[in-house]
């Protein structure tokens, strides 16, 4: 209450006296404070000023700050949200790479130079005769130059025996003086850490986007008032920055007006028009389901054919055998390229709002792309666990076909990422650029009717979400895959920027950034949750390879956790095993549900209070207007 009274006195002083009088009043108020409180107030002001200066300086160190600001001013916040999303993934993958490299790759590299002592994984005697034979397909003798290109594209040969893949990490422990560094435990904990880091970071950004979306959707009139009366930044002094801010506000208002126009159009539809639109949407959704089913069946048949014929060593035609081996990745990439084009064409006839149009297209493409990865992994695991005619009896998996199955899965994820990157590079070079030249230099009516390709935000976002899902799945099998993803997204930023400015045009219907940011992160969260499934199955269910990797001495990768807990004191063991039991999990889940219910009820109560305050403001406004009318009368 004292602070409120001081604030009111300061306001009164400022309104009724000149600024010098206010300063005298503040000085007199400060003199009545004790020495400790004066020091505390001065320190607080100095700290806030220092933090503000540090924050202002750090804003200049933000990656692509000027580029994204320029894109926002020229093309609106909708397209700017895509590039901000891309920057977030670059930072996320770079941090994951630092995590994996620091705790897994760097200790191995240091130990191989003899700086620290290390021990190799001990293999159980029952596995020595059958399961430990692993001969990577490294290049031996004189090889052709295109063999290195093939290795670069497929992850075989030289790359297979490097630190990029799981099979390279065969050390069990590293001794730093008398301290033992448990590499299998570090490998598993680093995997959990990058998944948890991704989850928490995405949730944090999603909550921020949800708040913005909630504020915007709460009252459209409030949104207009904020943009018109409080949207301008009066600290802008640079003419170029002022011009960009003006364009950004113009694009946002254009988006709001267009959405209101569409809402009005939807509200004015007759029953006949509604029946026509709903029938058309049902028909288009049937077509979409048929297309998805066709893609899934094609990928399944191609994957089965490749698994049955790619290991035919007696095949005289090596090039044909190589084509069969890479056929699933090629078909998946082709389906991922054709599918979004078809969906983007069909969505135009369904008459949705721009924001919902992007959401619907993304959902359809997400099912396509993520299901493609699922079909590929399912086919690989079915071959790895194929125990017909007692193939898996000695080792628990098909060791003859997959002696180091983790590296094989890592190679498939590596190929998918490389092929996806090649397609992203090839489309602007061989499709967008020639189309731009034709539109610019050819006056043919047909060419001018096609015009430049629109910059599809949904397609572009889905490309990077698909690649990020591959990275999350593949990092367990290829620990340095995040480094490749970081370079890939870094290059994609500049490719998309050039396409946006020179070879493509902005969408005819602009979208709002507040809703787009939240939905992009929601789809990314779906990709992360789906990535948990294959990684979790590989860790907990499928037997680990006995010929490579740090988990050769364990039946599954998960067994390193209880094996480490056994070395703890008895009391700590009981606590940890108790936390993993159902007796702890069920009450913990119930408590979490109660807490969630409490916060949900609290949010609803706050929402009702806000609505009541708005109604009171409206009533006060009417009362004030009536008083003015009476005074004028």
Image (spheres, rainbow, N blue to C red):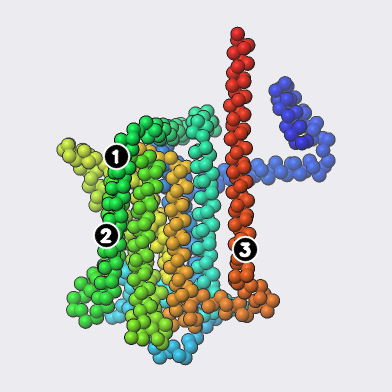
Vertical side of 286 occupied by 123: above or below: below
Label 3 residue SS: helix
Label 1 residue SS: helix
Vertical side of 100 occupied by 243: above or below: above
Q: Position of residue 535 (x, y in %)?
A: 45, 68
Q: Nearer the viewer, residue 54 or 560?
A: 560
Camera-side mark, 2 or 1: 1
Most extreme residue toward the top is 633
Q: Residue at x 79, y 33 (%)?
A: 29
- Mark 3, other Cα within 10 Å: few <14 / some 14–19 / many ≥20: few
Q: Position of residue 182 (x, y in %)?
A: 56, 77
Where on the picture, by quarter, is residue 67?
top left
Most extreme residue toward the front is 271
**Residue on which the image places disc 3:** 588
Q: Position of residue 20 (x, y in %)?
A: 73, 25
Q: Residue at x 66, y 73 (%)?
A: 575
Q: Is residue 69 visible?
A: yes
**Residue on which the image places disc 1:** 276
Q: Earlier in the sequence, mark 3 or mark 1?
A: 1
Camera-side mark, 3 or 1: 1
Q: Earlier in the sequence, mark 2 or mark 1?
A: 1
Q: Is residue 403 visible?
A: no
Relative to 376, 516 lies left or right = right
Distance (Cα) linking label 3 and label 1: 51 Å
């Amino acid at each position: 209450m004292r602070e409120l009274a001081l604030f009111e006195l300061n306001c009164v002083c400022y309104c009724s006296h000149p600024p010098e009088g206010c300063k005298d009043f503040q000085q007199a108020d400060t003199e009545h404070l004790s020495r400790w409180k004066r020091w505390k107030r001065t320190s607080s002001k100095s700290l806030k000023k220092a933090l503000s200066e540090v924050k202002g300086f750090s804003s200049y160190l933000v990656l692509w700050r000027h580029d994204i600001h320029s894109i926002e001013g020229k093309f609106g916040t909708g397209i700017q949200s895509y590039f901000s999303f891309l920057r977030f993934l670059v930072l996320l993958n770079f941090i994951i790479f630092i995590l994996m490299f620091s705790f897994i790759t760097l200790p191995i590299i240091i130990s191989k130079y003899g700086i620290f002592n290390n021990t190799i994984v001990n293999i159980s005697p029952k596995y020595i005769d059958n399961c430990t034979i692993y001969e990577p397909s490294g290049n031996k003798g004189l090889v052709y130059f295109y063999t290195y290109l093939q290795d670069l594209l497929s992850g075989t040969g030289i790359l297979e025996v490097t630190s990029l893949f799981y099979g390279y990490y065969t050390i069990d422990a590293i001794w730093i003086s008398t301290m033992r560094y448990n590499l299998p435990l570090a490998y598993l904990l680093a995997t959990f850490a990058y998944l948890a880091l991704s989850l928490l970071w995405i949730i944090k950004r999603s909550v921020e986007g949800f708040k913005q979306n909630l504020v915007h959707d709460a009252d459209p009139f409030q949104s207009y008032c904020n943009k018109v009366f409080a949207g301008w930044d009066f600290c802008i002094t640079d003419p170029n920055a002022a011009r960009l801010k003006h364009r950004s506000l113009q694009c946002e208002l254009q988006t709001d007006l267009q959405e209101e126009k569409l809402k009005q159009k939807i509200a004015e539809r007759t029953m006949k028009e509604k029946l026509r639109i709903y029938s058309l949407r049902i028909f288009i959704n049937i077509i979409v389901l048929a297309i998805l089913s066709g893609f899934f069946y094609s990928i399944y048949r191609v994957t089965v054919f490749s698994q049955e014929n790619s290991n035919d060593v007696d095949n005289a035609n090596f090039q044909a055998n190589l084509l069969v081996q890479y056929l699933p990745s090629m078909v998946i990439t082709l389906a991922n390229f054709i599918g979004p084009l078809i969906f983007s064409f069909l969505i135009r006839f369904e008459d949705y709002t721009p924001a919902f149009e992007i959401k619907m297209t993304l959902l359809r493409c997400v099912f396509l792309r993520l299901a493609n990865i699922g079909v590929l992994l399912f086919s690989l695991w079915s071959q790895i666990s194929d125990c017909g005619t007692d193939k898996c009896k000695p080792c628990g998996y098909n060791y003859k076909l997959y002696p180091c199955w983790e590296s094989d899965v890592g190679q498939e994820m590596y190929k998918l990422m490389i092929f996806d990157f090649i397609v992203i590079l090839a489309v602007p070079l061989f499709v967008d650029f020639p189309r731009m030249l034709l539109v610019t230099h050819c006056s043919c009516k047909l060419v001018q009717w096609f015009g430049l390709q629109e910059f599809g935000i949904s397609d572009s976002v889905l490309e990077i979400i698909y690649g990020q899902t591959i990275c999350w799945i593949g990092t367990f099998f290829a620990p340095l895959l995040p480094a490749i993803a970081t370079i890939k997204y870094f290059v994609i930023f500049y490719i998309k920027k050039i396409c946006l400015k020179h070879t493509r045009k902005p969408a005819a219907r602009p979208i709002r950034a507040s809703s787009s940011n939240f939905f992009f992160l929601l789809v990314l969260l779906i990709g992360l949750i789906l990535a948990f499934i294959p990684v979790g199955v590989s860790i907990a269910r499928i037997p680990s390879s006995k010929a490579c990797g740090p988990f050769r001495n364990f039946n599954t990768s998960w067994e390193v956790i209880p094996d480490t807990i056994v070395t703890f004191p008895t009391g700590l063991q009981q606590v940890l095993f108790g936390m993993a039991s159902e007796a702890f999990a069920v009450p913990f889940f119930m408590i979490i549900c109660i807490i969630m219910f409490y916060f949900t009820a609290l949010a609803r109560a706050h929402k009702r209070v806000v609505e009541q305050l708005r109604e009171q403001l409206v009533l006060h406004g009417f009362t004030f207007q009536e008083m003015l009318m009476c005074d004028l009368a």
